[in-house]
Image (cartoon, coloured by chain):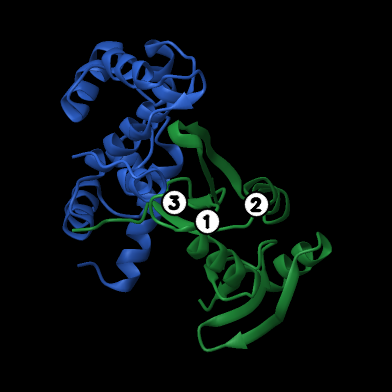
Chain colours: A blue, B green
């Protein structure tokens, strides 16, 4: 666990990722925000948050991509670009790996579950809220 | 290991009015505004610098979790100021206090020195109170 001073610097780097995840980011550029060497930043970040900076970045990008696929009428390529990926192939592959299906299938599945136009399926919101407000349980 | 908080709920009396308050008065940004099956409106806002922490503005209504009586009781408690929405941070509590007060935000405590910094307390337009804190550096 990082000491308070180091944690503050680490948080600066983490916030930098959160605020700029839609742009191309490099480990050295992120580490620079925390005034740490890339290797040191990577090691302390993983120790503190339980995931690497890249894993955190991917998580933010995929979450944003999922949101955009459901709520925005953008092409998969446009979603790919808007969450910070330059290659559609890399994005689709990464998305499939993380979500278990391709971006286009994810969109089709969720949209097809919606009976009415502009009514999103309960899967579009966190399950605890779907259960609390709609009484729908995933299993 | 839990690494961050993504969502927290604030129960409000009217989502439209709450959205107006949190965006136009407090300066939050709209996150999601989606109609979900079953008539539920998924409405979230976030601080401009903290997009990965969404506040869910939800109305307590009769449904799976709340009976009609429970929903009414919660609405009544909100109006009575029984619930706190949390702590919002500012770089300059005094300045933010003046800006928000000028916009009509109702404060129940002016900026006051505390052990952890300077703190003011206010109410949202449902009756939830929240702290505005400038942390001691």
| Residue situated in front as seen by the camera: A38 or B50 | B50
* Left or right of B82 in this view: A139: left
As drawn, A16 above or below B101:
above
- Kindly identify the residue that appears in the image at 35 percent across and 15 percent down: A112
> What's the chain of the residue with tag 3?
B
> What's the chain of the residue with tag 2?
B
- Kindly identify the residue that appears in the image at 20 percent across and 20 percent down: A101
Circle 3: is it few (<14), some (14-19), or many (20+) Cα within 10 Å? some
Report, in whole angstroms, how far the alpha carbon at label 3 lies from the one at label 1: 21 Å
Instruction: Using the image, tell me which numbered label, if any, was put on residue B60.
Output: 1
As drawn, B120 above or below A115:
below
Circle 1: is it few (<14), some (14-19), or many (20+) Cα within 10 Å? many
For the residue labelled by badge 1, is the local secondary structure a helix, a strand or a loop?
loop
* Left or right of B130 in this view: A33: left
| Residue A47 coordinates in the image, percent (x, y) | 16, 58
As drawn, A130 above or below B123:
above
| Residue situated in front as seen by the camera: B56 or B61 | B61
The residue that label 2 is drawn on is B14
> What's the chain of the residue with tag 1?
B
Report, in whole angstroms, how far the alpha carbon at label 1 lies from the one at label 2: 9 Å
For the residue labelled by badge 2, is the local secondary structure a helix, a strand or a loop?
loop
Of mark 2 and mark 3, the one earlier in the sequence is: 2
| Residue B101 coordinates in the image, percent (x, y) | 79, 67
Instruction: Using the image, tell me which numbered label, if any, was put on residue B20.
Output: none
- Kindly identify the residue that appears in the image at 48 percent across and 64 percent down: B70
The residue that label 3 is drawn on is B53
- Kindly identify the residue that appears in the image at 27 percent across and 34 percent down: A58
């Amino acid at each position: 666990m990082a000491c308070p001073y180091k944690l503050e610097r680490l948080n600066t780097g983490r916030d930098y990722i959160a605020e700029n995840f839609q742009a191309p980011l490099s480990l050295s550029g992120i580490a620079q925000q925390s005034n740490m060497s890339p290797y040191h930043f990577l090691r302390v970040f993983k120790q503190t948050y339980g995931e690497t900076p890249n894993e955190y970045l991917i998580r933010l990008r995929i979450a944003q991509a999922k949101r955009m696929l459901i709520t925005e009428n953008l092409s998969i390529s446009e979603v790919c670009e808007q969450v910070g990926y330059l290659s559609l192939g890399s994005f689709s592959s990464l998305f499939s790996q993380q979500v278990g299906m391709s971006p286009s299938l994810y969109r089709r599945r969720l949209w097809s579950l919606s009976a009415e136009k502009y009514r999103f399926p309960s899967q579009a919101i966190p399950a605890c809220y779907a259960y609390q407000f709609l009484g729908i349980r995933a299993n | 290991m839990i690494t961050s908080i993504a969502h927290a709920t604030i129960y409000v009396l009217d989502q439209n009015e709450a959205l107006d308050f949190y965006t136009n008065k407090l300066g939050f940004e709209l996150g999601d505004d989606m109609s979900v099956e079953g008539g539920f409106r998924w409405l979230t806002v976030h601080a401009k610098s903290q997009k990965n922490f969404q506040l869910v503005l939800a109305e307590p209504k009769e449904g799976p979790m709340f009976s009609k009586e429970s929903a009414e009781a919660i609405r009544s408690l909100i109006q009575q100021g029984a619930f706190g929405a949390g702590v919002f941070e500012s770089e300059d509590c005094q300045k933010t206090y003046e800006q928000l007060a000028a916009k009509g935000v109702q404060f129940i405590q002016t900026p006051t020195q505390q052990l952890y910094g300077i703190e003011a307390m206010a109410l949202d337009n449902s009756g939830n109170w929240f702290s505005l804190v400038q942390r001691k550096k």
